Image: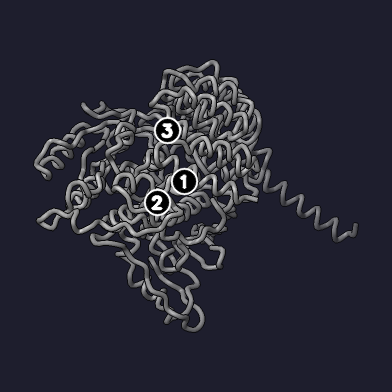
Amino acid sequence: MTNEQIAKMTLTAGAATLVAAGAVAQTNSAEVNKAFETLKTYDWGADRATLNPIDHAIIATHSDAVARQALEKKLVDALAGGLSRSAQDYVCRKLRVVGTSQSVDALAALLTDEKTSHIARYALERMPGAEAIAAMRDALPKVGGKLRAGVIGSLGVRRDEASVAAIAAFLGDPDKDVARAAAQALAMIGTPAAADALSEFAKTAPADMKVPVADARLLCAEQLLADGAKSEALALYKALNGSDQPPQVRVAAIKGMLAASTKK
Amino acid sequence: MAEQKSKPTQDRGMSAGRRAFLKATAASVAFPYVIPASALGNTGTTAPSNRIVMAGIGIGNMGSGDLGSFLGRDDVQYVAVCDVKRDVREGAVNRVNQKYNNRDCKAYRDFREVMVRDDIDAVHCATPDHWHAIIVIEACRNGKDIYCQKPETKTLREGKLMIDAARRYNRVVSGGSQRVLEDYRQAVDACWSGSKGAVRSINVNVGPFPTDCNKPAEPIPDGFDWDMWLGPAPWAPYHPHRCSGSYSIDGTSWRSFRDYSGGGMTDWGAHHFGGATFAMDVREMEPEEVIFHNENGRKFATCRFPNGKLLHHNYPGRGNLDVEFAGDPIPSKPVPGYAGTGGIYGDFIDCVKTRRRPFRDIEYAVHTANVCHLFLAAYELERSLKWDTARQQFVNDDEANRLVDVARREPWVI
């Protein structure tokens, strides 16, 4: 390594340190700390602008993992400290952008509460990593009613194959919102196992579930086809081209069969 | 989204009984659908049996205007209206029944009850934006065509799902910006004429950005289903400014707030960016990059399309719909327009009959909305982003990809 290269590296490292120091300083600035203090008493009707320093700190720490982690911890600590619903809402919105595995336990604790379940999913549903999915999977047997539909939907969006059996069990749920969410989630997961569960349920589906289940099977077939499972997709399409299906479903099935037969 | 898509083709369906035709149009069969003269009433008006049977969902404010535009047509028959506000839906039912001098129109609070009615061919949707994707997809899966107000989506993920649903079920799905064709004609004609050369860039000035709403709780008005109004959006207490359907974007209507709208960036952006992408003839494309600029604190951004054309937002010193041309004159192209008569509403109804794709086909409408959402993402994160149109993901940016969609409040799933 030449002296010039070393000097360049030193300068680069120094600049990075300065940037990091700046970001940490911003994370711990008086304005940011004041905003976190405000959060403790923040509620509906409060001036949203008082929290802006936290928003700015999120942008400022984008390229600084240490500062970002520190900021995330502050948000998690705030959440654990007991906040109003409005403040919880704010923190979860921020964790949607910056949350990592460090946030999962705090968010998971909110999943079973009717008032906070959705806003916890707001952060978890799009958070990279297996921990976020596992938290929602673990919450599924602990929630009921509408919350169950929500958790099922998020697991579907994440295409969680490990949840297929648990979700399939809700296809016949008397709560139609839950049953529809289960069908939709299985469609998004789109594996052969999900297709089998939908096809099995279709045999005995009540009248008001026929269209949601047919729609789910069509979506599932598209997913299978995209993933290369051509024969499984074709089987679904063929099953949906029966005289017992609504016209729009049969049209979709015929189009699907054509697509499957021409896919390489 | 499926690669850089080909331009929407002019699908036609088989001639058959009207309802069977509308519900079962097969893409592989191509015959024009024409209402025979013998099916018209003696007065020259369309016989009731050949009218497009419609329902309206979200019928206050803009929805009321849409209802009036469709209701004025003699080839349309409204049989249902749906709104979460009792006074709005009762007013609309009376308006429809007075028009037809009968009592056939039914009122609904829950759109899902409308969608399962077999006698309805098409619906118009003018709810707040956070409902659009759910309602459009539900219409398609139930075999109904739909006219949806702009901006058609609230998130990037919703767009592909809506296009897929429309194509899967062969439905006519029209976006709702009449201004795209009607308001920017000078710029469109200048660009499509080719006389000034190729378009290098267009600038759009529009805003403001959406904000979070933290309004305090107020009593929910009698007859207002607040939970249904919120729908897939995060729970929040009722406040009249939170849900007002007025056209303001100043914090006194839902159009101002992030949970229900993209603010002026999507509300007016759907018009302006729609006009700009039409003028640039990039309606069938999505940008592959959004470049964030911060020049001494002055922030603006640029979307770059795969063919190199640039769409600026708030570019310093340039006016709205300002076009930058380059090079020698190029051959002119005929400017596409509406089918049928009666503007964008007539275009939709004509396409319901003929199974053609409408001027504001959902694919074009989604592309415009995606321009708005891409700009919003870049401004929110204050950095440039690359967009993979095939995967509908930002490239190598996990943080940006979190902005592609939002988790929906239970029980809503798409």
Q: Closer to the camera, B30 or A151?
A: B30
State whether residue B327 is above or below residue B305: below
User: Where residue B394 sits in the image (x, y, percent)?
Assistant: 59, 49
User: Where residue B53 sits in the image (x, y, percent)?
Assistant: 24, 44
Q: CA distance from mark 3 to mark 2?
A: 42 Å
Q: Which is more foreground, mark 1 or mark 2?
A: 1
The answer to whether marks 3 and 2 mark residues whose Cβ atoms lie closer than 8 Å is no
Q: Which residue is mark 3?
A: A244
Check chain identity for marks 1 and 2: say if they share one. yes
Check chain identity for marks 3 and 2: say if they share one. no
The label number, if any, that marks residue B266 in the structure image: 2
Q: Closer to the camera, A140 or B14?
A: B14
State whether residue B409 is above or below residue B15: above
Q: CA distance from mark 1 to mark 2?
A: 27 Å
- Which corner quadrant of the image does residue A47 belong to? top left
User: Where residue B271 sits in the image (x, y, percent)?
Assistant: 36, 58
Q: CA distance from mark 1 to mark 3?
A: 19 Å
Q: Which residue is mark 1?
A: B168
Which residue is painted at 45% across and 67% down in the image?
A: B281
The label number, if any, that marks residue B34 in the structure image: none
The answer to whether marks 1 and 3 mark residues whose Cβ atoms lie closer than 8 Å is no
- Which corner quadrant of the image does residue A67 belong to? top right
- Seen in the image, is B269 located left or right of residue B120? right
Camera sees residue A151: yes
- Seen in the image, is B45 located left or right of residue B3? left
Which residue is painted at 36% across and 74% down in the image?
A: B189
